[in-house]
Amino acid sequence: MPLSFDPTVLLGPRYVLSGILAQLANAITSSMLALVGIVAILIFVKRAWLAWLAGVATLVWVVIQGTFSPGTPMLDLAIGCGIIGLFIGVILRWGLLATIAALFTHFMLLRAPLTTDITSWQGF
C-alpha cells in the first residue's frame, strides 16, 4: 500500500514520537472497534468458529478497500481473507492487548523505511 511520506518527521524527534503515538492511538481505537464487532457476532452466533467465519466475511472488505492495486481481485480477496483471518484469530484467542500489539506492529511496519541501509537515501 503506497503511503505518502510525512516530512514533519524531519523536524526533530518529537515529531517522530508524535507519529508513533498517533499510530498507537489508531491501533487502540481500531482494535477496540474490531473486538466489539467480533463479540457482537459471537453473542449472535454462539460459536467461535462461526464468529470467525462471519467476521472474515464481514471485515475482509474493510481490509482490501484501497490496500491493493487494481487488476487482481481474486488474489486481493485471498490475501485480505488471510490477513483478517489472522487478526480475528488473535482477537478470539488472546484478546484485546494482543490485538492492539499486533495492529500497532502492523501500522508501524507499513510506515517503515524501504531499507535498513542508512547510507541510502531511502533509509532516512
Image: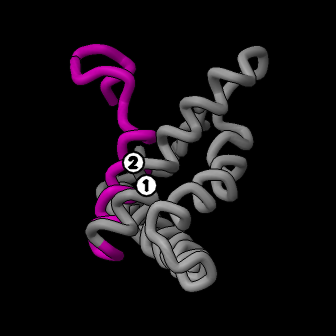
User: Which of the two residues, 44 or 77, is positioned nearer the viewer here?
Assistant: 44
As for residue 47 lying within the magenta part, the answer is: no
* Circle 1 SS class: helix
In the rendered structure, which segment of residues is drawn in magenta? Answer: 95-124
User: Which of the two residues, 6 or 67, is positioned nearer the viewer here?
Assistant: 67
Quadrant in the picture for residue 38 = bottom right
Q: Is residue 59 above or below residue 100?
A: above
As for residue 100 lying within the magenta part, the answer is: yes
Tell me what residue is drawn at x 38 percent, y 21 percent: 122
User: Which of the two residues, 89 or 49, is positioned nearer the viewer here?
Assistant: 49
Location of mark 2 (residue):
106
The percent coordinates of residue 95 (x first, y second) are 32, 74
Location of mark 1 (residue):
87
* Circle 2 SS class: helix
Tell me what residue is drawn at x 57 percent, y 55 percent: 53
Q: Residues within 10 Å of mark 2 (few under 14, many from 20)?
A: some
Q: Residues within 10 Å of mark 1 (few under 14, many from 20)?
A: many
Q: Quadrant of the N terminus?
A: top right
Q: Is residue 110 above or below residue 118?
A: below
The percent coordinates of residue 93 (x first, y second) are 30, 66
